[in-house]
Image (cartoon, rainbow, N blue to C red):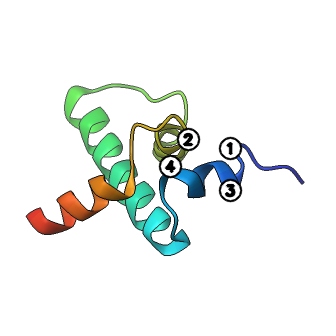
Amino acid sequence: MMLYPAMSKLNSYIPNRYMLVNVVARRARQIAEEAEVNGLHLDEKPVTLAIHEVADGKLTAADEAASAGEA
């Protein structure tokens, strides 16, 4: 079974799998909350959207470090 995007591509932006899970989960929650507040219907699941953001280079390990400092 082929996964898209490939894990190697995701790991090029976030080298640690556990950090990748944290980054994707946090962003997915943000996407879901924003959609609910704005009354938007999402065509794809929030996790899928967050994974695509990582694959596109929009989210990196530095983003996780910055958001962890805010918490």
> Marks 3/2: CA distance?
9 Å
Which structural element holds mark 4? helix
Decide which of 24, 10 is in the foreground and name it. Answer: 10
Q: Which residue is mark 4?
A: 47
Nearer mark to the viewer, of 2 and 4: 2
Query: Looking at the picture, which amino acid does disc 4 mark?
Result: Val
Do the residues bearing badges 1 and 2 touch, measured as CB atoms within 8 Å? Answer: yes
The disc placed on residue 7 is 3
First in sequence: mark 2 vs mark 4 = 4
Residue 1 lies in what quarter of the image? bottom right
First in sequence: mark 4 vs mark 1 = 1
Residue at figure coordinates x 44%, y 55% from the top left: 24
| 22 relative to 40, above or below | below
Q: Which residue is mark 2?
A: 55
Query: Looking at the picture, which amino acid does disc 1 mark?
Result: Pro
Q: Which residue is mark 1?
A: 5
> Marks 1/2: CA distance?
7 Å
Query: Looking at the picture, which amino acid does disc 2 mark?
Result: Ala
> Marks 3/4: CA distance?
15 Å
